[in-house]
Structures are given as structure tokens and as C-alpha cells.
Image (spheres, grey):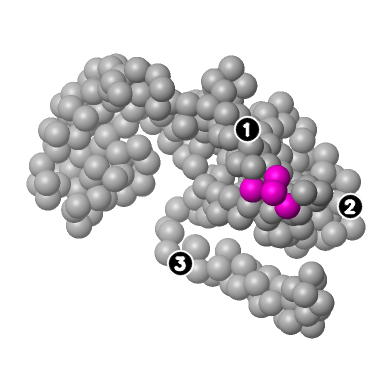
Amino acid sequence: MVIRKKIKLGLITLLIAAGFFYLESTYLMPWFQDNPAVVKNHIDFYALGNNKGTMLITGITKPWIVLQTMVDAPEKIYTLIQTHLPFGFLPLFSPFYLLTALPIWLERLLSATQARWLFEQYYGILLTPFLVIATGQTLKALSKRVTFKIWQLPSIIWMTLVIFFLSLTVAVIKHAPITRLIHSTYYHISTVEASMNQAVSLIPPLSSVSAQQPFVSHLSGRSEIYWFPEHINEVKYVLVVNSRPATPLNDTERGAYITVLLKDKTKVLVYENNGVYLFRNSQKK
């Protein structure tokens, strides 16, 4: 809107978006989710304040705190580099990218949840279309600077090949998903993953389950499934793996829940291997 000089329309859009965000975070999310910890975990920009109002005021009046927080950890800088390096940093020269991607980067890098910073996590997937479009825009702009038109197309091809090479450079971006395709380990199931699959196969199709996020897609075809540790005393089965995230719990809290479940006489340990635990509630029919 700024580029097209539609300031009034841009301000109206901004106000509507801000109003919807407040409505969503204050009323809709708590209404859909009965675990306050999960809702709180999505709005955790604690470097800016303890509530949404303070966060907003700090962000507007003290922008240097925002910038400092966005690069105050090596993982954040690493993610910024890894995200833009495969595209030759070309998106950074596109006003389109800077305007559209900034809200996504703010949400990720201002968060107190470390998983949101990491390049390997899925939180950056929303950036993909903007990165691709901005790269194309910058390549086109650079080609126009070539004096001889006959060299414009070859210059685009050459720069595209350089970007493709950067995407495959294992030594530089060792964790980039595309580089995993050339490693044999990508095509083999780990021992933990094999144990996870085995545990899932032991749960009857219609049984209620409380499980961690890595299991959700495998267990979603049932009428009653909860996000661990919700309703662990009401469901028939509880499935947890000690080596995977259990958001909103941290590693210590997840371990504490496993210890409690192991000591609970009403929870029968059906399966245990490689840190994967499957419990059956003996009091639940």
C-alpha cells in the first residue's frame, strides 16, 4: 500500500488486522483451547513486556529493543543467514519482501520459544512464496542493468545456477531440507522413529489418545485425540516420546510427566523402547 501510495487504505487494513489479532488472541483462541498455557505460549514476546499492550507500546516507542531482540542469540542469526543464503540474499533487495516478510520475522525472532527461531522448524514455511517472488523480482531488476540485451537472459540463467548451487552446498547450509535428499540417512527410519511407529500400531483405531505433536498426523483419524498432556487421566491411551518436543512443555516438564505416569498404578505401561512410552488407562473402558 505504501509503494502504491494508498496510505488511507493501508491504515484501514492495519487497524482491521490489529483489531482481529486482539479479538483472536483474547477471545477466540481461549474459547477453542481449554489449556491457557497453550494460548499464552503463542504470545510470548516477553522481551517487550508482560502483556499485549506493553509489548505494542515498547515495539513502537523503543524499536532498538525490537532489533536487539531479533539478533540476541546465535540461533537467530544462523536462521537469518540460512534462510536467505540459498537465494543469494537477493530477496533483501526487494521492497516487496521486506514489507511482507517483516511481520513473519518479528513473530519468530521476538518469541521466547526457541523452536520458533530454528531453521529446521516449520515456522519459516510462510516465507517461501515471498522469498521466491522477491528473488525473481531482483533477478529481473539486475538483468535490466546489463548493457547488452543479448546478455540479459544468460545473466539470469547464470545467477539462477549460482542460487541453485548455494541451495545444495552442504558445507554451508548443512541442515537445509534440500541437502538431506543427497544423504542416505534421509531414506532410512531411525530407531526412535521405528519405535514411534510400533507404539502407534498398538493403539486401536477408535480409542481415545493424548499424544505429542509428532504423533498427531498418525492418530488424527479418530473422534477423540488430545494434545499431550491434556486429558491424560480421561483418555484410554497416553503416547509420549522423551526425545521429541512436547510444546507447551519444556524438556524438564515433559520428563516430569513421564515419571508421574510411570508411578501411576492406573496407567499400564504397554510399550517402552528408545524413550517411547505408551500407557493404557486401566480405569477407562
User: Which quarter shows the N terminus?
Assistant: bottom right
Which secondary structure, mark 1? helix
Q: Where 10 falls versus 168 (above or below)? A: below
x then y, percent, for residue 187: 30, 24
Q: Which mark is residue 31?
A: 3
Amino acid type indicated by mark 2: Lys
Q: What's the CA distance linking mark 3 and mark 1?
A: 49 Å
x then y, percent, for residue 168: 53, 27
Disc with the residue nearer the chain's start (3 vs 2): 3
Q: Which residue is mark 2?
A: 62
Which secondary structure, mark 3? helix
Q: Which residues are magenta?
A: 149-153
Q: Residue at x 18, y 53 (%)?
A: 222
Disc with the residue nearer the chain's start (3 vs 1): 3
Nearest the eye: 10 or 73: 10
Amino acid type indicated by mark 3: Trp
Q: What's the CA distance linking mark 2 and mark 1?
A: 39 Å
Q: Which mark is residue 162?
A: 1
Q: Residue at x 78, y 80 (%)?
A: 6
Q: Residue at x 69, y 49 (%)?
A: 150
Nearest the eye: 110 or 1: 1
Amino acid type indicated by mark 1: Val
Q: Where 88 falls versus 208 (above or below)? A: above
Contact check, label 2 and label 1, Cβ < 8 Å = no
Which secondary structure, mark 2? loop
Inspect the magenta stretch and tell me whether residue 25 lies in it.
Answer: no
